[in-house]
């Protein structure tokens, strides 16, 4: 493998695949303990970055706009999000995370034991390196991964 950059890339793709599978499995189980589907939990996670228009949420989460409406309806019924008019376009409704929605995301992340245990094996330098590498690898998707504050 050392002389073959494609083999290295294939190995990294496999490691990313396994890592994301573990992360999302962990996330899905933790979200379920809060009575949420994985899609509802992911929606709250995206909204933690700030308010979003419904169409932008659907694009970010790669789902149909009608499906996004159902997800938001259920989250709003539980008091985890609210809809409000966009300050720049009154025809657009933004979805905003409530304090309760914020609390639920914190609770989900606190229950992601596989992920937390894995990250706990990293020291501060390792964490900074990992964050920098992930930012570089996914730089083409700036809306999906917010830069870390260092």
Image (cartoon, grey):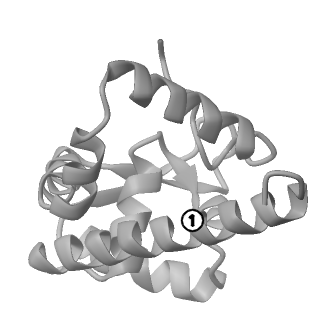
Query: Which residue lies at the image location 47% right of the left edge and 54% below the top edge?
Result: 46
Report whether 38 appears left or right of 9. left
Camera-nearest residue between 24 and 52: 24
Query: How many marks overall?
Result: 1
Residue under label 1: 15
Residue that lies at the very extreme toward the top in this rendered image: 150
Query: Is residue 25 in view?
Result: yes
| Residue 129 screen position, x and y as percent | 52, 27
Query: Which residue lies at the image location 57% right of the left edge and 35% below the top edge?
Result: 146
| Residue 87 screen position, x and y as percent | 59, 36
- 76 vs 80: above or below: below
Report whether 45 appears left or right of 3. left
Circle 1: element type: helix
Q: Quadrant of the N terminus?
A: bottom right
Crowding at mark 1 (Cα within 10 Å: few <14, some 14-19, many 20+): few
Report whether 124 appears left or right of 99. right
| Residue 51 screen position, x and y as percent | 49, 44
Query: Which residue lies at the image location 45% right of the left edge and 76% below the top edge?
Result: 21
Query: Which residue lies at the image location 43% right of the left edge and 51% below the top edge?
Result: 47
Camera-nearest residue between 25 and 46: 25
Query: Is residue 83 in view?
Result: no
Report whether 110 appears left or right of 24. left
């Amino acid at each position: 493998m050392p002389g073959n950059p494609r083999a290295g890339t294939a190995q990294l793709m496999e490691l990313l695949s396994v890592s994301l599978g573990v992360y999302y499995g962990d996330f899905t189980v933790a979200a379920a303990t809060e009575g949420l589907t994985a899609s509802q939990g992911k929606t709250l996670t995206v909204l933690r970055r700030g308010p979003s228009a419904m169409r932008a949420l659907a694009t970010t989460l790669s789902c149909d706009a009608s499906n996004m409406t159902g997800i938001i309806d259920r989250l709003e019924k539980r008091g985890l999000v609210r809809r409000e008019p966009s300050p720049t376009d009154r025809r657009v409704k933004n979805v905003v995370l409530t304090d309760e929605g914020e609390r639920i995301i914190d609770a989900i992340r606190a229950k992601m034991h596989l992920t937390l245990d894995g990250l706990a094996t990293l020291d501060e330098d390792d964490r900074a390196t990992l964050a920098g590498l992930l930012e570089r690898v996914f730089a083409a998707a700036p809306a999906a991964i917010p830069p870390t504050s260092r």
